[in-house]
Image: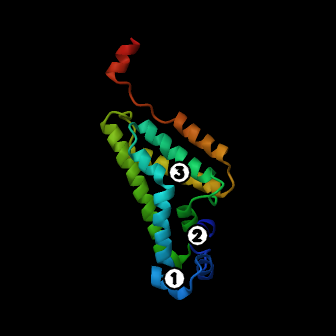
Amino acid sequence: MGLFWRRGYEGTSMADLTAALGITRASLYAAFGNKEGLFQRVMDRYEAKAGGYRTAAEQAATSLEAVRLWLTGPVALHGDKQNPPGCLGVQGALACGVESDTIRSDLASRRQRGEAAIRRRLQRAAKDHDLPGDDDPADLARYLSALIYGMAVLAAGGTRRGELQGVADVALHHWPKAPRSRKQRNKSS
Protein backbone atom coordinates (compact mmCIF):
# COMPACT_ATOMS: atom_id res chain seq x y z
CA MET A 1 0.00 0.00 0.00
CA GLY A 2 2.77 2.41 0.92
CA LEU A 3 4.50 2.01 -2.43
CA PHE A 4 1.35 2.72 -4.44
CA TRP A 5 0.44 5.56 -2.06
CA ARG A 6 3.80 7.28 -2.45
CA ARG A 7 4.44 6.57 -6.12
CA GLY A 8 1.01 6.11 -7.68
CA TYR A 9 -0.04 3.16 -9.81
CA GLU A 10 2.28 3.71 -12.75
CA GLY A 11 5.17 4.94 -10.64
CA THR A 12 5.30 1.60 -8.84
CA SER A 13 7.11 -1.09 -10.80
CA MET A 14 6.73 -4.84 -10.60
CA ALA A 15 10.31 -4.98 -9.31
CA ASP A 16 9.33 -2.56 -6.52
CA LEU A 17 6.34 -4.70 -5.61
CA THR A 18 8.14 -8.05 -5.62
CA ALA A 19 10.98 -6.59 -3.53
CA ALA A 20 8.58 -5.03 -1.00
CA LEU A 21 6.50 -8.20 -0.74
CA GLY A 22 9.50 -10.53 -0.76
CA ILE A 23 7.98 -12.71 -3.47
CA THR A 24 8.72 -13.57 -7.08
CA ARG A 25 6.85 -12.18 -10.06
CA ALA A 26 5.26 -15.59 -10.59
CA SER A 27 3.98 -15.61 -6.99
CA LEU A 28 2.56 -12.11 -7.39
CA TYR A 29 0.75 -13.14 -10.58
CA ALA A 30 -0.53 -16.34 -8.91
CA ALA A 31 -1.85 -14.41 -5.91
CA PHE A 32 -3.29 -11.31 -7.61
CA GLY A 33 -3.48 -12.02 -11.33
CA ASN A 34 -1.43 -8.94 -12.23
CA LYS A 35 -0.35 -5.54 -10.94
CA GLU A 36 -3.82 -4.15 -11.61
CA GLY A 37 -5.43 -6.87 -9.49
CA LEU A 38 -3.02 -6.15 -6.65
CA PHE A 39 -3.71 -2.41 -6.89
CA GLN A 40 -7.47 -2.97 -6.72
CA ARG A 41 -7.05 -5.14 -3.62
CA VAL A 42 -4.84 -2.47 -2.09
CA MET A 43 -7.50 0.17 -2.88
CA ASP A 44 -10.18 -1.97 -1.21
CA ARG A 45 -8.04 -2.22 1.93
CA TYR A 46 -7.17 1.49 1.81
CA GLU A 47 -10.82 2.50 1.52
CA ALA A 48 -11.78 0.22 4.42
CA LYS A 49 -9.01 1.61 6.63
CA ALA A 50 -8.53 5.23 5.58
CA GLY A 51 -12.13 5.85 4.59
CA GLY A 52 -13.61 4.89 7.95
CA TYR A 53 -14.59 8.51 8.53
CA ARG A 54 -16.92 8.25 5.51
CA THR A 55 -18.86 5.40 7.08
CA ALA A 56 -19.13 7.30 10.35
CA ALA A 57 -20.36 10.38 8.45
CA GLU A 58 -23.06 8.41 6.66
CA GLN A 59 -24.35 7.23 10.05
CA ALA A 60 -24.12 10.59 11.83
CA ALA A 61 -27.24 11.83 13.59
CA THR A 62 -27.29 15.23 11.86
CA SER A 63 -26.09 16.54 8.52
CA LEU A 64 -23.81 19.01 10.29
CA GLU A 65 -22.11 16.19 12.19
CA ALA A 66 -21.80 14.21 8.94
CA VAL A 67 -20.19 17.19 7.22
CA ARG A 68 -17.84 17.71 10.15
CA LEU A 69 -16.71 14.07 9.83
CA TRP A 70 -16.34 14.31 6.03
CA LEU A 71 -14.11 17.35 6.44
CA THR A 72 -12.08 16.41 9.51
CA GLY A 73 -11.50 12.82 8.35
CA PRO A 74 -9.18 13.91 5.53
CA VAL A 75 -7.43 16.33 7.90
CA ALA A 76 -6.62 13.45 10.26
CA LEU A 77 -5.69 11.07 7.44
CA HIS A 78 -3.53 13.45 5.46
CA GLY A 79 -2.18 15.26 8.51
CA ASP A 80 -0.85 11.99 9.97
CA LYS A 81 2.91 11.97 9.36
CA GLN A 82 2.83 8.15 9.52
CA ASN A 83 1.00 8.17 6.16
CA PRO A 84 2.47 9.11 2.81
CA PRO A 85 1.27 12.56 1.72
CA GLY A 86 -1.99 12.80 -0.20
CA CYS A 87 -4.57 10.16 -1.01
CA LEU A 88 -3.82 6.77 -2.53
CA GLY A 89 -6.81 7.05 -4.86
CA VAL A 90 -5.83 10.51 -6.03
CA GLN A 91 -2.11 9.69 -6.27
CA GLY A 92 -2.90 6.55 -8.22
CA ALA A 93 -5.08 8.39 -10.71
CA LEU A 94 -3.03 11.50 -11.35
CA ALA A 95 -0.18 9.80 -13.13
CA CYS A 96 -1.96 7.19 -15.24
CA GLY A 97 -1.22 6.90 -18.93
CA VAL A 98 -3.46 5.48 -21.64
CA GLU A 99 -2.33 1.91 -20.93
CA SER A 100 -3.78 2.24 -17.41
CA ASP A 101 -7.27 3.36 -18.42
CA THR A 102 -8.86 0.53 -16.43
CA ILE A 103 -7.18 1.81 -13.25
CA ARG A 104 -8.19 5.40 -14.00
CA SER A 105 -11.75 4.22 -14.65
CA ASP A 106 -11.83 2.17 -11.44
CA LEU A 107 -10.60 5.12 -9.39
CA ALA A 108 -13.17 7.43 -11.02
CA SER A 109 -15.90 4.91 -10.15
CA ARG A 110 -14.71 4.79 -6.56
CA ARG A 111 -14.87 8.61 -6.35
CA GLN A 112 -18.35 8.59 -7.90
CA ARG A 113 -19.53 6.00 -5.36
CA GLY A 114 -18.14 8.17 -2.57
CA GLU A 115 -19.95 11.23 -3.89
CA ALA A 116 -23.16 9.20 -4.30
CA ALA A 117 -22.95 8.13 -0.65
CA ILE A 118 -22.59 11.77 0.41
CA ARG A 119 -25.52 12.74 -1.82
CA ARG A 120 -27.75 10.01 -0.35
CA ARG A 121 -26.94 11.15 3.21
CA LEU A 122 -27.69 14.77 2.33
CA GLN A 123 -30.91 13.78 0.55
CA ARG A 124 -31.96 12.05 3.76
CA ALA A 125 -31.07 15.22 5.68
CA ALA A 126 -33.17 17.33 3.30
CA LYS A 127 -36.11 14.94 3.70
CA ASP A 128 -35.72 15.17 7.49
CA HIS A 129 -35.59 19.02 7.28
CA ASP A 130 -31.98 18.91 8.47
CA LEU A 131 -30.89 21.06 5.49
CA PRO A 132 -32.39 24.28 4.21
CA GLY A 133 -34.98 23.56 1.54
CA ASP A 134 -33.27 25.57 -1.19
CA ASP A 135 -29.92 23.72 -1.06
CA ASP A 136 -29.53 20.89 -3.58
CA PRO A 137 -28.04 17.76 -1.95
CA ALA A 138 -26.35 16.82 -5.25
CA ASP A 139 -24.61 20.21 -5.47
CA LEU A 140 -23.57 20.01 -1.83
CA ALA A 141 -22.23 16.47 -2.37
CA ARG A 142 -20.12 17.66 -5.32
CA TYR A 143 -18.87 20.56 -3.19
CA LEU A 144 -17.86 18.25 -0.34
CA SER A 145 -16.19 15.81 -2.75
CA ALA A 146 -14.21 18.67 -4.28
CA LEU A 147 -13.10 19.74 -0.80
CA ILE A 148 -12.17 16.20 0.26
CA TYR A 149 -10.12 15.51 -2.85
CA GLY A 150 -8.75 19.05 -2.91
CA MET A 151 -7.39 18.57 0.60
CA ALA A 152 -5.70 15.37 -0.61
CA VAL A 153 -4.00 17.28 -3.42
CA LEU A 154 -2.95 20.02 -1.00
CA ALA A 155 -1.52 17.41 1.37
CA ALA A 156 0.41 15.77 -1.46
CA GLY A 157 1.93 19.18 -2.14
CA GLY A 158 3.11 19.58 1.46
CA THR A 159 0.23 21.42 3.11
CA ARG A 160 0.38 20.80 6.85
CA ARG A 161 -2.37 19.48 9.10
CA GLY A 162 -3.21 22.88 10.62
CA GLU A 163 -3.63 24.38 7.17
CA LEU A 164 -5.88 21.50 6.12
CA GLN A 165 -7.91 22.08 9.28
CA GLY A 166 -8.24 25.72 8.22
CA VAL A 167 -9.86 24.58 4.95
CA ALA A 168 -12.29 22.38 6.90
CA ASP A 169 -13.07 25.20 9.34
CA VAL A 170 -13.91 27.66 6.57
CA ALA A 171 -16.17 25.13 4.86
CA LEU A 172 -17.93 24.30 8.13
CA HIS A 173 -18.40 28.00 8.89
CA HIS A 174 -20.16 28.49 5.56
CA TRP A 175 -22.14 25.25 5.60
CA PRO A 176 -25.90 25.86 5.19
CA LYS A 177 -27.65 26.01 8.52
CA ALA A 178 -30.66 23.79 9.04
CA PRO A 179 -33.91 25.61 9.70
CA ARG A 180 -34.79 25.80 13.35
CA SER A 181 -37.57 23.51 14.40
CA ARG A 182 -40.84 24.93 15.69
CA LYS A 183 -39.84 23.78 19.17
CA GLN A 184 -36.53 25.71 18.95
CA ARG A 185 -38.34 28.85 17.68
CA ASN A 186 -40.83 28.70 20.57
CA LYS A 187 -38.01 28.41 23.14
CA SER A 188 -36.32 31.58 21.86
CA SER A 189 -39.58 33.59 21.83
Can you identify the residue that label 3 sits on?
A: 148
Label 2 crowding class (10 Å Cα cut-off): few <14, some 14-19, many 20+? Answer: many
Which of the 4 quarters of the picture holds residue 169?
top right
Q: What percent of the width, then of the height, locates residue 174?
A: 52, 35
Taking the view exactly as shown, the residue that stands out farthest to the bottom is: 26
Q: Residue at x 59, y 65 (%)?
A: 5
Q: What percent of the width, then of the height, locates residue 188?
A: 41, 14
Which is in the foreground here, disc 3 or disc 2? 2
Tag 3 near tag 2, CB within 8 Å: no
Can you identify the residue that label 2 sits on?
A: 4
Of the residues under marks 3 and 2, which one precedes in the sequence?
Answer: 2
Q: 42 or 126, which is in the foreground?
A: 42
Q: Is residue 34 above or below residue 80?
A: below
Q: Is residue 101 above or below residue 68?
A: below
Considering the numbered disc 1 on the image, is that residue within a helix, a strand or a loop? helix
Amino acid at the residue labelled 1 = Leu
Q: 147 or 165, which is in the foreground?
A: 165
Label 1 crowding class (10 Å Cα cut-off): few <14, some 14-19, many 20+? Answer: some
Q: Residue at x 66, y 43 (%)?
A: 162
Q: CA distance from mark 3 to mark 2?
A: 20 Å
Which of the 4 quarters of the picture holds residue 133?
top left
Amino acid at the residue labelled 2 = Phe
Label 3 crowding class (10 Å Cα cut-off): few <14, some 14-19, many 20+? Answer: many
Quadrant of the frame with the N terminus: bottom right
